[in-house]
Image (cartoon, helix red, strand yellow):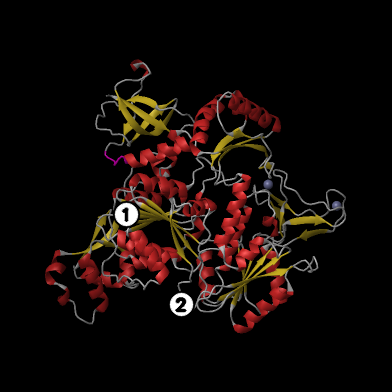
Amino acid sequence: MKILRVALDLPLDTLFDYLDGGNSQLKVGQRVLVPFGKRQVIGIILARTALSDVADSKLKPIIQGFGDEPPLPAATLQLLKFCADYYQYPLGQALLSALPSRLREGKAAQLPKVTAYQLSAQARSAGLDAIPARAKLQRSLYQALAHTEPLDAAALAAVSSGWRNGIKQLMQQGWVETVATEHVLPPHTHQAISSPALNPDQQRAVDAMLAEAQAFKVWLLYGITGSGKTEVYMRLLQEVLSRPDTQALVLVPEINLTPQLEARFRARFPHLPMVMLHSQMNESERLHGWLRAQSGEARIIIGTRLSVFTPIKHLALMVVDEEHDASYKQQDGMRYSARDIAIVRAKSAGVPVVLGSATPSLESWHNAQSGRYGLLEMNNRAVLGAALPQIGTVDVRQLPPQEALHPQLIAAMRQRLERGEQSLLFINRRGYAPVLLCSACAWVAPCTRCSSRLVVHLRDKRLRCHHCGHEQRMPLQCPSCGNPDLRPAGQGTQRLEELLAEQFPTARILRVDRDSMRRKHAIAAMTKSVHAQEVDILVGTQMLAKGHDFPHLTLVGVIDTDSALFSPDYRAAEKLFAQLMQVSGRAGRAGKAGQVLIQTAFPDHVLFHALQQHDYAEFADTLLAERQLANFPPYCFEALLRAEATHYQAVREFFHAAMAASATISHHLAVYDPVRPRMERLKGMERAQLLVQAGARPALQKFLRAWVPLLRSLPQASKVRWSVDVDPLDY
Ligand SMILES: [Zn+2]
Ligand SMILES: [Zn+2]
């Protein structure tokens, strides 16, 4: 069995055989460095075999094996094999892309040594009593080190911010010494914040889940904003992690991974090693978190989408917070849904998975209604006396087109200013204005690379495409008719900020969007100043919609939502409802009643009625009935074939061949004609897509297994960039 079958990071559905070169200890799941053409690449061993299809004389030996490293667990390999098959993605690429990039590059899977501090033998034998009672800092440091050692700087800083002085004195006395270590534990002495009493809703949810905590089950925790879902997660973790060596994985959308959330978990579980895994970390931090999860050292793993593939030694519980969030779906490479993969993973590990949301995806809602998932509802706000915000619409039809803000909204803001409370204006468009318009001929500045318009960024006098990043100077006159009177039309965050400054000259206004929050720590600084009541009015995009909890914020105004009401995308209503619900949740949390005012030209729309009643369930049932009638997901299963090229001709030819290939397969599903998406042209590429719809998942999978290999072998396929998206969210 000297032949290793290796998966490589290549867009091919094959494995490659190599001789083990005498490295008989190498195991399945371990990495190897192998020659491939003129390159050297990292691969993962998937099998050992005695026979190869390639003649022995042509087999090459590996260059290097990483035999002393822990192999990827069989469960991880199995999960990624499932994904490669389900999402029609080459296995080698699926496997390698799940690794931290350091491992893909061939770096060692090794934890770094850090400097830590421990008590000397002398200190241990002398005991705490040898330190004078007045040396309080030294005594508390001694106590911390006596419980768990060694401790690193971060752990000691948790004991006291002035720890460096105390440690210096202890070292001078020969009581503390430094040591280089890979494993640093949090101090046991740091007092855990005791868990608050649960309200009846929370208690019921926790009890129900704990009763079945040791087996696979999907729970949908449907709790309104402010109902205390995080507390439920933490209580479950507390119970499940009280079993020795168990680990829990908590998935959160990228935007929700705030320092507050991390701090909240750390304060509750100071005694449990915790790692974070997300895209803001540098590569070595990510590798170290990954290794600690794999080794079993990290008991709590909190991460975004990609962390769903992290090997975890003793997985006992998974949580997917805000399960409806679109950021769980990967939009390039292997287009997986981390939520769906979490369920697959929980099933094979035999552990429960909790999906939490105030506005569950229709898929999950449907599964809960049909009894496939356990449904737990929390309809009350957790903080006593915190009422639900009052949601209303203001009709903008009577508003003159130049007026961005309705007098009713302005009056409500003025009232907040007088009471010393905060307001938030939510507008989902950054920049100054969405378009630059010629007053004479109605020319609009287009992006030359996309079928979109350029957004006006007045401050730096530039036009930017928010789709491809293209930017240019603002023209001095209309390129079409020569008219010098070009006007920004419509509202963006910057223009709204300007308008508010005119309307409320003494108010302190803060804009929160991707442009103003670009600097590191900008979000943390923003949060701090809002909490310190240094801000009266916040103007922001969806960055502000989630996660933040501002007790003095009592008014939320929503500008410009109407485009989503009549979108051709049938998911738009679901997304808009979730977003408005989430924004509404920002208003009035700590005993102060909140108010939400939505500016719309369609105040009678069914969506606003449901929103005013805070009735997600009714709205979801309405949408589900519509979907059933139209035969849309979750009542059917879909895959989308996308292709793009610089010239549309190549795209057309590819789809023509793809359709012909589908006709050679016997199937019982609908293969629709290719169509152009809303953004026909993006980043200089002409695009089209083709939808496949099936009544059942297995039928779709069977068809894709036959069809995708045919697509790969099409000569037309090499002239376009194409991809298959199973369970697509965007069309
Ligand atoms: Zn013009
Ligand atoms: Zn563009």
Query: Residue 66 vs residue 202: left or right?
Result: left
Q: Residue at x 57, y 61 (%)?
A: 618
Image quadrant assignment for residue 485? bottom right
Q: Mark 1: which amino acid?
A: Gln
Q: Toward the viewer: 79 or 109?
A: 79
> Magenta residues: mostly which secondary structure?
loop
Callout 1 secondary element: strand
Q: Toward the viewer: 352 or 617?
A: 617
In the image, residue 532 lies at what x, y percent? 52, 77
Question: Which image quarter holds the N terminus?
Answer: top left
Residue topped by disc 2: 384
Q: Mark 2: which amino acid?
A: Leu
Q: Toward the viewer: 660 or 58?
A: 660
Question: Which image quarter holds the C terminus?
Answer: top right
Up-down: is 454 above or below 87?
A: below
Other-residue count near label 1 (Cα within 10 Å), few / some / many at <14 / 14–19 / ≥20: many
Res. 244 in view: yes
- Asked if the beta carbon under badge 1 is closer than 8 A to the nearest atom of ligand 2, the reply is no
Q: Residue at x 36, y 49 (%)?
A: 290
Callout 2 secondary element: loop
Query: Residue 456 vs residue 180: left or right?
Result: right
Residue topped by disc 1: 247
Q: Circles 2 and 1: CB distance less than 8 Å? A: no
Image quadrant assignment for residue 119? bottom left
Up-down: is 552 above or below 59?
A: below
The segment highlighted magenta reads 68-73
Up-down: is 43 above or below 110?
A: above
